[in-house]
Image (tube, rainbow, N blue to C red):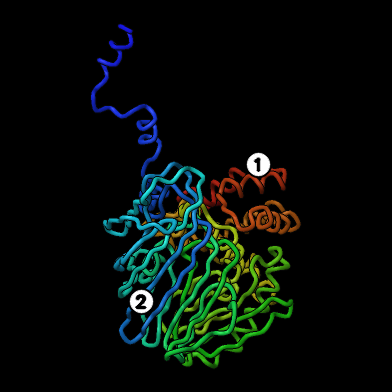
Amino acid sequence: MAALISVLACAPADEPPPDQAMSAVAHTAGAPGIGDPDFPTDGNGGYDVSHYALAVDYAPTTKRLEGVTTIQAAATQNLSRFNLDLSGLDVRGITVDGSPATFARKGDELTVTPSAPIDKKARFTVKVTYAGVPKPAKDSANLGTYGFISTADGAFVTSEPNGSKTWFPNNDHPSDKATFDFAITVPAGVTAVANGELTGQPTTAGGKTTYRWSERHPMATYLATATLGKFDLRQGKTPGGIPNFAATDPKFRSSLDKLYTVSGEVTDYWGTVFGPYPFSSTGGVVDDYAAGYALENQTKPVYGGFEPDESIIAHELAHQWFGDSLTIKRWKDLWLNEGFATYAEWLWSEHKGKQSAEAFFNDYHKRPASDPMWAYPPGRAKPGDLFNQSVYTRGGMTLHALRKAVGDQTFFQLLKAWTAGHRYGHVTTDEFIALAERMSGKDLGPLFDAWLYQPRRPA
């Protein structure tokens, strides 16, 4: 008994019993970033989202949005609290598994503390009620203005790279993909376009119409859209049988049939080059907002304030494979999206009997060694200049150099193997190089190093 008394006497009087101490240590806060060093506050650690259900009510006259986002996720660690990405909007309440949770805001970080800790691997549901006037993100070094952008009759919604947080709380990084359901309520006469397919006919009551869309395939948050406005619509199927949805603002009414027809033709052709189309519908949207860019929103590419030509449609629809189905884990590998889509433009031209990919390659390669493109190695996209032309053009040239090195048969087999092997998943440059070397039986390290990583014009 003396030994036992001695041990007890040495313990602090306020120390918790061993089982309580273990519990306190076991549950920790999820990181405020997902781990991308180039965008350290994007995304969040400690959980993985499987599904978003968005209910959004938007009034174009007041620009006010009221929303309820329900998130289904699984903990990747023992969680005491976790973060969501949300910019600007006012949070009215949060529940976790139906119980009220406490929350705090700091910048774009919304920290949620559930009423009880969440164990690793446990599935949980978060419901966030919020409202306010969305403010788009602005980054002149990248795409300029993006996110939820109000327009005279609705909204233009394009969120690359990290603008989804301007209109719903989420894990805003491409390395965490999820399925989506949308219930979007707008004034009667306004059309709401989102990803995937309509799950039924729109319903109207009290002067408002609700559109319900569902994207059943995993999708990065930056590809989610809720583009709203007055649109002319054309719906049907591509010649190959894929549902096709085209929408144009009345200002671009004359381009509706072209958008519909070319989108269908391109989708079907890419299916023969890149492998089966990965989603359940295709199409596009032309809105009357002078964005100065287009974005490959999953199943619904959006063209901002211009009538897209065949080359741009070919580019955005190639992204359905390269970027949407195959999604980068880190933004530094952006050439895997943009280089492939740029090369697709050249392949489309070649397919149509116009300029060949070889001619495009040669024209660009003639640029002088002093051209800024050669000083920007596209294999390492810079966070302050993600969408530099080198990521597009020199990225596309990398693929043509590879095609010349391995031959057409191996090259086009490689593209199909690449899309099939990573369908709906995530990819890295190292994985692509390894596959190219395995399929060609060649050491391609010097080729990829010269084209992707050296700040000079390759010989």
User: Nearest the camera: 69 or 325?
Assistant: 69
Res 92 label: none
On screen, residue 149 versus residue 357, left or right, reads left
Residue 456 visible (yes or no): no
* Circle 1 residue: 443
On screen, residue 271 versus residue 73, left or right, reads right
Label whose residue precedes the other's in the sequence (1 or 2): 2
The residues bearing labels 1 and 2 have C-alpha atoms spaced at a distance of 54 Å
Residue 94 position by quadrant: bottom left
Question: Residue 372: where, in percent of width, then height?
Answer: 42, 59
**Which residue is at a point 68% across and 63% down the rendered structure image?**
274
Q: Residue placed farthest to the front in the image?
A: 1
Res 65 label: 2
Badge 1 element: loop
Badge 2 element: strand
How dense is the environment of label 2, judged by Cα within 10 Å: few (below 14), some, or many (20 and up)? some
User: Do the CB atoms of the residues marked 1 and 2 lie less than 8 Å apart?
Assistant: no
Residue 41 visible (yes or no): yes
What amino acid is found at the position of numbered circle 1 in the picture? Answer: Asp
User: Nearest the camera: 21 or 147?
Assistant: 21
